[in-house]
Image (spheres, helix red, strand yellow):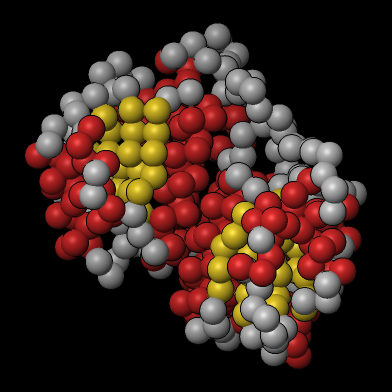
Amino acid sequence: MDNAGTKTRREILSQPEVWTTTLDVIHDRSHELKRIWQEQQFDSVVLTGCGSTYYLALTAASILQQRTGLICRGVPASELLLYPQLVYPSSGKTLLIAISRSGETTETLSACRAFLRDDRGTLLTISCYPDQPLATMGALNIVLLDAREESVVQTRAYTSMLLAIIATTAIWADQSEVLQRLEKVPAAGQELMDRYRDTMTTLGRDPEIESFYFLGSGPQYGLACEASLKMKEMSLTLSEPFHFLELRHGPKSIINPAMLVVGFHSLAHQSIEQDVMTEAKALGGKTLALGSSAADITIGHDHDEEVLSLLYLPLIQWLATERAIRKGIDPDHPKNLDTVVKLTMSE
């Protein structure tokens, strides 16, 4: 296991550098992004993906709605295929933002084709590979070449595509000050990784931890889902995501000393979320707070709320990687997973 996780670790650590080039891509396409938003006058926005990119869509939809006031939804691509009438409005123009690392995931491609066939609105795509089908399907296609990965499990592709959408929403909301602050994200990410990587290594290798809860509300809920998925994919460990207050409605019944409860905290509702973490600790669980102080271990940074959550993801990815290696699992070769999910489907 000496070389276990070599690719995954390298890609996790490369994220600050890749974030810099991601912001460059969005800056270079800013006029096109602004034009498509201003000219089309959308009535609604749907963001879609599969697996990690579905969870990305959840977070991105929350951020976009906060910044623009337009109703936005994050939906799995499969639901767009099976139940489009429950997602798309019966009238008006929709912006569909399709997100895919590979650009060739079957459900995402099929959902985009159906959207275009039914003339529901405008398609914008975000992916990492220019030679794959999704990268040419939209009215506007954003491709993040430097976010491409060798690993099966998404790390830098996820955070880079999320950063691209955060920057895009700032452009659409005409928030130049947000774009200026985003330029500091790569350095902030590097600082957090340098300061807390050893902490994540220790937690990941802790033999007393057997399961995980990841908590987040609002924009942070999608990140909690993604963090939980990373733990499952890499280390085959029991892990579940919940909204903060939902922890009290049943899930708290199985909190125990062998569980680590991780909170993605907001700035707006810290006191409520801290109460939940305090309760989890009182029930015997170990606690890790990202952006708060009511926990056994706390990690914080002074930055915009949406970006704060993004900055914490590399640390959680590192935690999952170390957990996998401690269990004798190579995160570069996760069980039962493929880099791209391709299915035979009738459209």
Vertical comparison of 30 with 82: above or below: below
Q: Is residue 286 visible?
A: no
Q: Residue at x 67, y 81 (%)?
A: 90
Vertical comparison of 228 with 164: above or below: above
On-image quarter of the C terminus:
bottom right
Q: Is residue 327 visible?
A: yes
Q: Quadrant of residue 213?
A: top left
Q: Position of residue 197 (x, y in %)?
A: 40, 34
Q: Residue at x 73, y 57 (%)?
A: 81
Q: Position of residue 125 (x, y in %)?
A: 76, 63
Q: Residue furthest left?
A: 282
Vertical comparison of 40 with 217: above or below: below
Q: Residue at x 24, y 24 (%)?
A: 258
Q: Residue 257 vs residue 70: left or right?
A: left
Q: How many marks?
A: 0
Q: Nearer the viewer, residue 23 or 63?
A: 63
Q: Position of residue 192 (x, y in %)?
A: 40, 46
Q: Quadrant of residue 151?
A: top right
Q: Position of residue 50 (x, y in %)?
A: 65, 48
Vertical comparison of 95 with 321: above or below: below
Q: Residue 172 vs residue 194: left or right?
A: right
Q: Residue at x 72, y 33 (%)?
A: 339
Q: Nearer the viewer, residue 326 or 17?
A: 326
On-image quarter of the N terminus:
top right
Q: Residue 171 vs residue 237: left or right?
A: right
